[in-house]
Image (cartoon, rainbow, N blue to C red):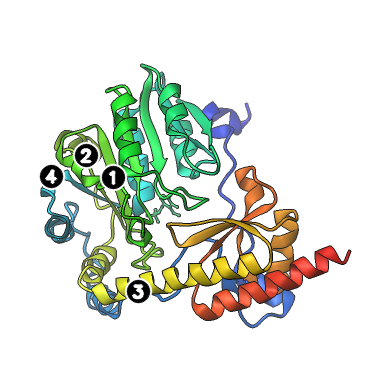
């Protein structure tokens, strides 16, 4: 017998996550001093000094298991968002809360619905649980909520909406979400994944915690990975009505979030200036990039997140290779089924300037061929 026969069919079909080449290898091979990484929507301003201090303070305690109830962090989030502590769940990144939702809610006969292209964790969760994944094509690079509601059946148990939508940065507004929630069967739980929430400028963005307060079958996800710049520590949080939140906690591994990560997240919440600085950087950066894309005649999608989806007019793999040789990494659109688009994280003013300069070089070289 082949040992691979022991692996479940739904897992065997998956392709392991490929982060691409390691930056250190790329630097060495190409003789570059620095790589500007605009591929994973991280925050290049880095974490709050308060978070770094908290990490150092928590370091000697790592011989202890962390608080499995995340008490201090839950209380701080409860105060910040005026939500009862029993509605709050903390995960090893919001990724883990997505996984908990799968474990808590999905039986193999259930269906999981999301937009195509999806955030990678949504189909992965369906596969982990052996469920059918139903992907609904985007409409004009945003969620087609009518089609998503129409794709729901009595078997649908989870619906994922990333808002803003990764990879395009578009949002669905409050009135659209209200209408959508009224159409979805009450046996389907809707996950509103708001990883980029703090970067949204549109006043029409949903007050999604109200859905949780009303006891609707909704889970709202947020994260410390993006604006708080703690991606490497892996802390995310979610809000759900108490009965659902309890189910997520029942599905959660004990001691899931390290003490260092909990301490850093807690300290980050005290530093409002770090959030404002990061917002300013992204909001100014996106306006700069819009102007530059217009100057270069490139179509782009106005964004509510810290990344922009832009049609570079050549194959995104070629654009990626050209940019990487010049020390900048982005995400190719071909993985999202949109082969001439790239997704670029909005960086510091200097990173954005270098990105535009290198993009211009790559496009000039491609047009001269
Ligand atoms: C839409 C979306 N949801 C969730 C996540 C996961 O974030 P975390 O680092 O909190 O697991 C990401 C990360 O890129 C994302 O883009």
CB at disc 2 and ligand 1 closer than 8 Å: no
Res. 4 image quadrant: top right
Alpha-carbon neighbours of circle 3 within 10 Å: few (<14), some, or many (≥20)?
many
Element carrying mark 3: loop
Left or right position of 173 against 243:
right
**Earlier-in-chain disc, 4 versus 2:** 4
Reading the image, the residue beneath label 4 is: 86
Between 83 and 253, the one nearer to me in the picture: 83
Separation of marks 4 and 1 at Cα, in angstroms: 14 Å
- Residue at 34% x, 56% y is 197
Q: Nearer the viewer, mark 2 or mark 1?
A: 2
Q: Marks 2 and 1: CB-CB under 8 Å?
A: yes
Is there any visible trace of residue 272 in the rendered image? yes
Between 165 and 178, the one nearer to me in the picture: 178
**Earlier-in-chain disc, 3 versus 1:** 3
Separation of marks 4 and 3 at Cα, in angstroms: 28 Å
Q: Nearer the viewer, mark 4 or mark 2?
A: 2
Reading the image, the residue beneath label 2 is: 211
**Earlier-in-chain disc, 3 versus 2:** 3
Q: Marks 3 and 2: CB-CB under 8 Å?
A: no
Reading the image, the residue beneath label 1 is: 220
**Earlier-in-chain disc, 2 versus 1:** 2
**Earlier-in-chain disc, 4 versus 3:** 3
Element carrying mark 4: helix
Between 208 and 135, the one nearer to me in the picture: 208
Res. 1 image quadrant: top right
In percent of width and height, residue 102 lies at 36, 34
In the rendered image of this protein, does residue 15 appear above or below residue 53?
above
């Amino acid at each position: 017998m082949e040992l691979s026969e022991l692996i479940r069919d739904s897992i065997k079909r998956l392709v392991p996550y490929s982060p691409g080449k390691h930056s250190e290898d790329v630097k060495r091979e190409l003789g570059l001093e620095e790589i500007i990484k605009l591929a994973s929507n991280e925050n290049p301003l880095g974490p709050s000094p308060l978070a770094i201090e908290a990490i150092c303070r928590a370091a000697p305690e790592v011989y202890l298991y962390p608080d499995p109830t995340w008490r201090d962090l839950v209380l701080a989030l409860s105060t910040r968002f005026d939500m009862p502590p029993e509605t709050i769940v903390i995960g090893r990144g919001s990724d883990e809360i997505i996984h908990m939702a799968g474990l808590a809610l999905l039986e193999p006969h259930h269906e999981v619905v999301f937009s195509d292209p999806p955030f990678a964790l949504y189909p992965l969760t369906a596969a982990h649980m052996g469920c059918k994944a139903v992907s609904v094509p985007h409409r004009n690079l945003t969620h087609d909520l009518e089609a998503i509601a129409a794709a729901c059946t009595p078997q649908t148990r989870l619906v994922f909406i990333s808002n803003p939508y990764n990879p395009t940065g578009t949002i669905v507004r409050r009135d659209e979400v209200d209408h959508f929630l009224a159409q979805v069967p009450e046996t389907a739980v809707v996950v509103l994944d708001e990883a980029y929430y703090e970067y949204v400028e549109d006043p029409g963005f949903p007050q999604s915690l109200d859905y949780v307060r009303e006891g609707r079958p909704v889970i709202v996800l947020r994260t410390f990975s993006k604006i708080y710049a703690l991606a490497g520590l892996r802390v995310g949080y979610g809000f759900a009505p108490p009965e659902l939140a309890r189910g997520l906690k029942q599905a959660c591994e004990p001691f899931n979030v390290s003490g260092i990560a909990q301490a850093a997240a807690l300290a980050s919440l005290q530093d409002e200036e770090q959030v404002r600085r990061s917002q300013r950087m992204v909001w100014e950066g996106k306006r700069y990039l819009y102007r530059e894309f217009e100057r270069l005649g490139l179509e782009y999608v106005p964004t509510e997140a810290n990344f922009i989806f832009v049609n570079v007019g050549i194959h995104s793999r070629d654009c990626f290779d050209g940019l990487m040789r010049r020390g900048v990494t982005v995400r190719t659109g071909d993985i999202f089924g949109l082969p001439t688009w790239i997704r670029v994280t909005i960086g510091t003013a200097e990173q954005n300037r270098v990105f535009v300069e290198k993009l211009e070089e790559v496009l000039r070289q491609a047009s001269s061929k």
